Image: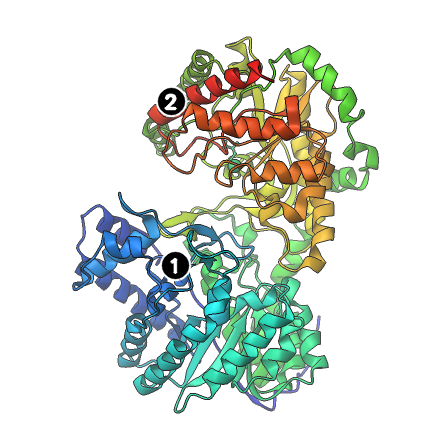
Amino acid sequence: MTVLNAARPSTGRTGSTVAGYPRQGANRELKKATEGYWACRMGAAGLLDTCRQLRLSRWAELAAAGLDELPSNDFSLYDHVLDTSWLLGAIPERHRAAVPDVSTAGSRLDRYFAMARGTASAEPLEMTKWFDTNYHYLVPELAPDTVFDLDPTKPLTEFAEALAAGWRTRPVIVGPISYLLLAKPTADAPEGFRPIDLLDKIIPLYGRLLTLLAEAGADWVQFDEPSLVLDQPQKILELVGNAYRTLAAVEDRPKIIIASYFDRLGEALPVLAGLPVEGLAVDVTGPAAANRDDLVRLGGLPGKRLIAGVVDGRNIWAGDLDATLSILEELAGLADQVDVGTSCSLLHVPLDVALERDLDPAFDGWFAFARQKITEVTTLRRGLVGGRPAIAAELSRNAAHRTARAASPIVGVPAVRNRVAAIVDDDCRRSSGYSQRRPAQRERLRLPELPTTTIGSFPQTSALRRARAALRRREISTEQYDEAMRSEIAEVVAEQERLGLDVLVHGEPERNDMVQYFAEQLDGFLSTQQGWVQSYGTRYVRPPIIVGDVWRPAPMTVGWATYAQSLTDRPVKGMLTGPVTMLAWSFVRDDQPQSDTAAQVALALRDEVADLEAAGIAVIQVDEPALRETLPLRRSGRAEYLDWAVRAFLLTTAGVDDRTQVHTHMCYAEFGDVLDAIIAMDADVISLEAARSKMAIVADLARAGYPNEVGPGVWDIHSPRVPPTEEIIDHLRAATASFGGRIWVNPDCGLKTRDYPEVRESLANLVAAAHEVRTTL
Ligand code: GLN
Ligand code: ZN
């Protein structure tokens, strides 16, 4: 332990700050107020006032915690990229038309929410994942003739609000390059147009904003450019130079700091370092740790300010204060001013560990949610200024907690470790190739050509949600709850038989969420009560935490699957969430490689697969919607990731008999980078989202020589629209042209968010289309 080492105090100036903070409030006041406004329970004034109170209490809290500089404009009513579209006036015509008059505060909110959520007449903006996080942003829609028009109200108001309360904040704004790179062309934009072509049009607006912020009293402004951590071509890096040189030339402007996060900057770092801006905020955690060496190699940022993102903003573990302080000491000499900061906005972690009232005291000091991370930042700053003795008590407490965690019997379970160590290649390989498995499965399942099935879930009705809430409040017994689930399963099975589907599902009524449901039953996972993290808009999720070695104390799904199978002669698909998705939608361990955690989860699931098989379930689906989503941002990290991801899937599934059919399901259809991995997963059948992209994925799979069976989704379940039979027939003809009889007929994804009337109609059309195309195969 090095707690007693006297560190050399840093010579330059140092401060502390944060890149952004959770927006929702301790009781998710923001969600309640926003949904109250949508339901007309609250007026515009009430909602705006709630937002103002939330912002003021966030600043007060951060200031009281001792941060030297506070951010502003990191708050959002819905999403910060949407806010940037609003800032630049990039509002699609359909949303202007939906709310034509915006002379009142209420109507401005309505137009803003029209962009976010759509109206009866106007589709919302598309939503997509924010880099490799589980936050979703609203994709700007741009065309060559988009007319930009600055509306600086939000950043200016928030800045003035804070200043009036005594805090000169650093407004945080999505930078021009990332804004355009995150945008997509409108549907009718000419071929070849790219939103980045509009850079010259928006730079003057950013310049004007700088002037206005300076007039309002801002010393610093932060432009977020996270897109620069992706592999960007030289052309883009040149545009970065042009854009920021122009902005830097604005007279009487605040000082500019450019922030990036989530991965290393690589070739973008020297470009940013060479700009005539006053500072950089750089992530130095996780995959971005390499930025440290890169900064040193570059000779630092002489004359500039560096916000060192040393406190991990994406995970919930209490950091290693001693090690982090060493990193800060190394960085301290590299710039004129080095501030202690978070790697990214704390938006991606829950607010406060102290809100977890039922947390076992054994976990004391293990976790740092947003509030605890702020304390880490201010503690580290004191340590950087005063040396280790200045924070001796914190260092020794932190070291004691880390020692306790490392020694905990929850963290290290010898039986699990031994099992992982004993994995051999044969465990990750089906015993026969697909060409031998196919006849064995056909013989057993006796399915028609182009078999029909669904992806797993059926509508989660309000009755189901009520039953779950009643169980939680102990108003009904577990027996009564199970009975309610069984009767739902019976109805779902009967419904599918009536519709004439070939491979049935039990409908997943018992699952609150496809990851949480398993996390609650696996040892090594911890669920939180209040650990809410924004997924999009007013939707928050509570990702489970993988605290220790993972194992399965008892079967998890076998009872439901066998019950469903007992009701029908048709095969019922067992339904599991795969290891990669279990990791992707949880907070993962920081004390062992992800590949080890994935292998542990895979072994637990492998046991479940074996139990399902032994119970007579002939078709087992292992969902991996996150496989594509969590692909590392930089190409250089991808091969290694795909390697362990595929291995974990195979470890889960490959133990079954030739006659057992393994399915997998993924959602997003951009598979370019992962086609080889999908082939290597060797599922007998893969179902994918395909309807929206008009089956483009089928051609991609065919080109890649995908050898097994494919179920390209023929019904876009993201909208309530019922697909006409003719349309499904067209889709199927396109698919069978490449894959012949190796095609399955299914929707794009699960049906849990849909309502029964449209589900019945759509599935009836789907079955009818399959019958029609079968006759001509
Ligand atoms: N089996 C899951 C369901 O149908 C799959 C969900 C998903 O792909 N996200 O709900
Ligand atoms: Zn899906």
Q: Residue at x 31, y 73 (%)?
A: 152
Q: Residue at position x 46%, y 60% from top?
A: 183
> Which residue sits at x=46%, y=89%?
249
Q: Position of residue 143 (x, y in %)?
A: 42, 61
Q: Secondary structure at mark 2?
A: helix
Asked if residue 526 is positioned above or below residue 344 in the image, the reply reads above
Along the viewing direction, whichever of 37 and 712 lies nearer the viewer: 712
Is residue 261 or residue 164 the one in the foreground? 261
Single out the residue that lies furthest toward the front: 190
Q: Is residue 471 above or below residue 320?
A: above
| Residue 213 x %, y % | 34, 82
Q: Secondary structure at mark 1?
A: loop
Q: Residues within 10 Å of mark 2 (few under 14, many from 20)?
A: some
List x then y, in percent, for residue 289: 66, 68
Q: Nearer the viewer, residue 150 or 166?
A: 150
Q: From where the camera sits, is residue 29 visible?
A: no
Give the quadrant of the C terminus.
Answer: top right
Residue 648, by quadrant, is top right
> Which x, y percent locates residue 481?
40, 23
Disc 2 marks a residue whose amino acid type is Glu
Where does label 2 land, which residue?
Answer: 761
Q: Report which residue position mark 1 lands on.
A: 79
Question: Which of the two discs, 1 and 2, labels the residue nearer the N terminus?
Answer: 1
Residue 748 appears in the rendering: yes
| Residue at 45% over, 28% down | 727
Instruction: Look at discs 1 and 2 and give the one toward the viewer.
Output: 2
Amino acid at dot 1 = Asp
Q: Is residue 224 left or right of residue 165?
A: right
Query: Which residue is situated farthest in the top direction here?
Result: 569
Number of numbered discs: 2
Left or right position of 90 against 227: left
